[in-house]
């Protein structure tokens, strides 16, 4: 008795559990046994009271003891064991106390009783935390007994140790059911566990670390996390950031210039014979579809990441084509006539696969479900219909108070459906909970767009405003974007750029307007068209390409202004060189390492 997890095991299994693990019984980011031995000639350093109050930085915001500890942890994590030990000795600040080291070693060695004994001495923790950590340790002990076929020992642990904690009753019942598992594979699957051994014990330590106070066990890779927070904060604060390169330099503060925004017309497409009303890039970014008053839709193929060529002209509608929707896999396209039928097209061949019609429906919009086999159609008859590809009506949403459907969208995960009408209501349907709620606007709505992540929606209003709402209804009031012109016509906006950081919209003054999504700052006003710009669409995989459709019968493809890029890069290099000459010491970047405040957008 008293042999912890060795209780009742045959000699071969006792040896397997008690031998040191390949990581010297410690998690990545902490000193190895060899490194600890290297510093054993001197007494273990302890944090002095002076260290607890000593502050660093020009604003006195950084506690020295915390600063040194996370640097020490980073050294160990990078494999610089001796450097970490030397830093502990010279600073007099240890990364972890001897009790914490003992606790980690016992966990990784499977010495469960010793682990619990160390937990008593590890530091001041409240009763709830103590019970929760004890539960996880004893759960691992229980599961390892079962893994080695020691059912009696597992049952004893469950009855005399786990149950007496008086917490997680439901989980205790689950653990009891695992005793009946017929094999190890079934146990691992049902318990959602990694099996006895190093991996599951390391995972256990990670779980324990989340429960214990950070002053006792510094969170894993804390320095990396703080630096990433600082970089994220700088990136989010950069209103022009639109680069696919995620690696930001630590040597200088991050800054982008407006040359990251596509602002130059790369190509003018003139295949349509009348006003171009709507356009949309495919989800894979390889195609663009446009619709026109000339009763056709055109599929364009993107080539060289910055230009397009005509692939198919789709004919068959008897009325102007006003809307398109790409299938999730970008292989099929739905086109909707203006209060007419909806057609399904094959992208490879350009042939019509099916025509969907319903008497008196007068369809105006359509949207796919993520399975690629179902879609919804909306029209003037105040109903929304779900159809399958074969043309069978699967479900419908009807209400006496529901106005005629003007626009439709389904979130990427299929959990919500959003509809708007020519009046002032946005209806959001929670398809999982079978509920709906209504957002009421003060002015009539002309169009709807949903973000790629399914969290936000944009609506254009006739009072020359674009409103952003979150689909989860956490925003009490919308974010607003102003500056464009819209009083008479249907104008469509879209999300776009890296991380969909921008909002772009057409305008009745023949220009395109681009705002920063988070700040609402108007960044660009782009001339070029000679008629109302009805619709814009940003390439989802190329943040440096978007398209615009106009009453002037043309489509414009927009890209980066290479000349502006070269001049901005030269100016930035000159500024950086002067900055380094004027400041011999590097910026104290760690003073900006603070948690990012959560944002709704």
Image (cartoon, rainbow, N blue to C red):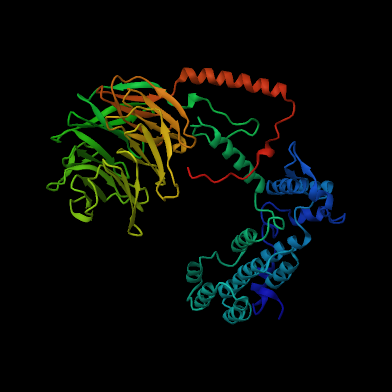
Q: Quadrant of residue 205?
A: bottom right
Q: Quadrant of residue 303?
A: top left
Identify whether 418 is placed above or below 498.
below
Q: Quadrant of residue 589?
A: top right
Residue nearest the viewer, comparing 63 with 100 = 63
Residue 538 visible in rendering = no
Q: Residue at x 79, y 48 (%)?
A: 53
Identify whether 542 is placed above or below 597.
above
Q: Residue furthest right?
A: 42
Residue nearest the viewer, comparing 408 with 222 = 408
Q: Is residue 186 left or right of residue 206?
A: left
Q: Residue furthest front?
A: 442
Identify whether 267 is placed above or below 75.
above
How far from the left and from the top, in percent, is residue 337?
18, 38
Q: Residue at x 59, y 82 (%)?
A: 152
Instruction: State which quarter of the image contains the N terminus.
Output: bottom right
The total of numbered circles placed on residues is: 0
Q: Is residue 556 left or right of residue 148?
A: left
Residue nearest the viewer, comparing 142 with 164 = 164
How far from the left and from the top, in percent, is residue 349?
22, 37
Q: Is residue 121 left or right of residue 357?
A: right
How far from the left and from the top, in percent, is residue 518?
48, 37
Residue 596 visible in rendering = yes
How far from the left and from the top, in percent, is residue 217?
70, 57
Residue nearest the viewer, comparing 175 with 213 = 213
Identify whether 188 is placed above or below 223.
below
């Amino acid at each position: 008795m008293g042999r912890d997890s060795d209780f009742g095991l045959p000699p071969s299994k006792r040896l397997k559990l008690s031998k040191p693990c390949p990581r010297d019984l410690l998690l990545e980011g902490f000193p190895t046994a060899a490194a600890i031995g290297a510093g054993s000639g001197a007494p273990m350093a302890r944090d002095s009271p002076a260290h607890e109050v000593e502050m660093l930085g020009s604003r006195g915001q950084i506690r020295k003891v915390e600063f040194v500890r996370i640097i020490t942890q980073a050294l160990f994590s990078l494999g610089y064991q001796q450097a970490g030990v030397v830093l502990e000795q010279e600073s007099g600040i240890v990364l972890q106390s001897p009790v914490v080291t003992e606790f980690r070693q016992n966990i990784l060695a499977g010495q469960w009783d010793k682990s619990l004994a160390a937990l008593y001495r590890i530091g001041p923790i409240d009763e709830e935390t103590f019970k929760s950590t004890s539960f996880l340790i004893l759960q691992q002990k229980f599961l390892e007994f079962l893994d080695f076929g020691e059912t009696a020992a597992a049952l004893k642990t469950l009855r005399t140790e786990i149950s007496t904690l008086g917490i997680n009753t439901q989980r205790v019942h689950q653990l009891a059911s695992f005793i009946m598992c017929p094999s190890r594979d079934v146990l691992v699957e049902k318990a959602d566990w990694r099996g006895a051994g190093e991996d599951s014990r390391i995972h256990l330590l990670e779980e324990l670390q989340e429960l214990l106070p950070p002053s006792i066990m510094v969170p894993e890779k804390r320095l990396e996390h703080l630096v990433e927070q600082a970089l994220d904060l700088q990136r989010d604060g950069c209103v022009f950031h639109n680069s696919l390169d995620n690696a930001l330099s630590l040597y200088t503060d991050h800054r982008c210039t407006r040359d990251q925004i596509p602002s130059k017309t790369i190509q003018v497409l003139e295949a349509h014979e009348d006003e171009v009303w709507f356009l949309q890039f495919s989800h894979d970014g390889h195609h663009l579809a446009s619709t026109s008053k000339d009763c056709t839709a055109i599929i364009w193929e993107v080539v060289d990441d910055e230009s397009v060529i005509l692939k198919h002209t789709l004919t068959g509608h008897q009325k102007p084509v006003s809307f398109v929707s790409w299938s999730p896999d970008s292989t099929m396209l739905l086109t909707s006539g203006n209060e007419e039928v909806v057609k399904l097209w094959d992208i490879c061949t350009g042939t019509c696969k099916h025509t969907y019609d319903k008497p008196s429906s007068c369809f105006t919009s359509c949207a796919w479900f993520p399975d690629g086999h179902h879609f919804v159609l909306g029209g003037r008859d105040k109903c929304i219909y779900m159809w399958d590809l074969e043309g069978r009506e699967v479900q419908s949403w009807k209400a006496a108070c529901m106005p005629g459907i003007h626009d439709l969208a389904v979130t990427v995960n299929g959990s919500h459906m959003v509809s708007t009408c020519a009046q002032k209501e946005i209806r959001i349907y929670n398809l999982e909970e079978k509920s709906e709620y209504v957002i009421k606007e003060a002015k009539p709505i002309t169009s709807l767009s949903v973000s790629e992540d399914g969290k936000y929606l944009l609506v254009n209003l006739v009072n020359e405003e674009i409103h952003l709402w979150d689909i989860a209804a956490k925003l009490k009031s919308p974010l607003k974007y102003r500056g464009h012109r819209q009083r008479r016509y249907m104008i469509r906006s879209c999300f776009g750029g890296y991380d969909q950081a921008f909002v772009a919209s057409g305008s009745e003054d023949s220009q395109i307007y681009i705002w920063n999504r988070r700040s609402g700052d108007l960044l660009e006003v782009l001339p070029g068209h000679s008629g109302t710009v009805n619709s814009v669409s940003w390439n989802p995989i190329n943040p440096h390409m978007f398209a615009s459709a106009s009453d002037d019968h043309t489509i414009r493809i927009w890209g980066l202004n290479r000349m502006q890029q070269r001049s901005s890069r030269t100016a930035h290099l000159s500024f950086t060189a002067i900055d380094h000459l004027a400041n011999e010491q590097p910026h104290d970047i760690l003073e900006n390492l603070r948690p990012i405040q959560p944002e709704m957008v």
